[in-house]
Image: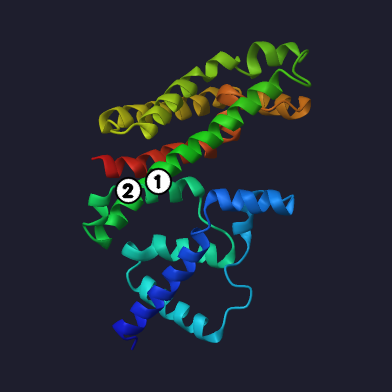
Amino acid sequence: MVSSKEVADAAADAVRAARKASEISESEIFADWRRLGSPVAPLAHFDQPLWSTPSAAMEKKRNLLTRHWISKPDVWDFWRYWYRGYHIGKPLDWELQRRVALIPTEDWEQGQAHIAGRIAEIQANQEVRSRIGELEAELSSSAASRFGIGGNHPPEAIIETAIPRPNELIFVWEPMTELMVEAQAASPDPDRVQDILDRLVAALKMGLEWVASKIDLAVDTAIKWGIPAIGGGYFALNPSKLEAVVNAGEAWLVFLR
């Protein structure tokens, strides 16, 4: 049985270790980086394990603390992964850490369970932003490639029937952009978020239905000419990115209700 004092001591040691890593101010990191002429970017120094050779005593305390964290994962999971990130040299996403650090004082004063809920909401919101960013980048790349190498003089069949025009992506671009605006808003509107998600689901369905009528021509010609599919064809071949946005949005919406 782990005593409360042992857990408290282990927690204090973990906090001191993490604080020591974070007490180095940004200016000091950059100053050392310039003085040493290091080719490694400043934040890359956090990509090193916290301890090169941790002592047995430190490992024992860390294990005690870990056992405490996993006893209430709904409360402590974020902090377990936060500390583990620094411990092994793979910190959590910096923007996520920044947003957690900026949680208002009045929230912190309401206790660990309340903070866990606030962090979960931030994580859900951050997931929406990340998935939108991935989809936006892939759609941009696909559209650019379509009219780049191999796209200047494609066969007539591709121009007229197999691949939709880039402006047909508007049925995804618009709601995707609107969802990002809501995700970045100080007070997102849950009804608006729901409407946007409904439109994105309809967009995915539209793309799949479009390609169902001409799947052989669309897929075969795209593969033959090395042209990334866009519009409806894109979503028939790559539905996971849009589905990931929708799933992340639905998970975030739970916190807005």
179 sits to left or right of 56: left
> What secondary structure is marked by label 2?
loop
Q: Residue at x 61, y 22 (%)?
A: 214
Residue type at mark 2?
Ile
Q: Which residue is mark 2?
A: 103
Instruction: Quadrant for the C terminus, please.
Output: top left
Which label was assigned to residue 115? Answer: none
Percent across and percent down for residue 203 are: 45, 25
- Counting from the top left corner in percent of width and height, residue 111 is at 23, 61
Q: Could one spot residue 229 in this view of the protein?
A: no
Q: Which residue is nearer to you in this view: 136 or 106?
A: 106
- Residue 150 makes an appearance in the image: yes
The span from disc 1 to disc 2 (Cα, nearest Å) is 7 Å
Mark 1 residue crowding within 10 angstroms, few (<14) / some (14–19) / many (20+) = few
Q: Which residue is mark 1?
A: 99
Identify the residue at image location x=35%, y=79%: 7
Above or below, 185 relative to 51: above
Does the CB distance between marks 1 and 2 fall below 8 Å?
yes
Quarter occupied by the N terminus: bottom left
Q: Amino acid at mark 1?
A: Arg
Point 29% across, 82% down: residue: 4
Crowd band around label 2 with a 10 angstrom C-alpha radius: few (<14), some (14–19), many (20+) = some
Q: How is the image coloured?
A: rainbow
Q: Position of residue 78 (x, y in %)?
A: 40, 60
- In the rendered image of this protein, does residue 205 appear above or below residue 32? above
Q: Which of the 4 image quadrants contains residue 145?
A: top right
In this rendering, the answer to whether 152 lies above or below 22 is above
Q: Residue furthest bottom?
A: 1
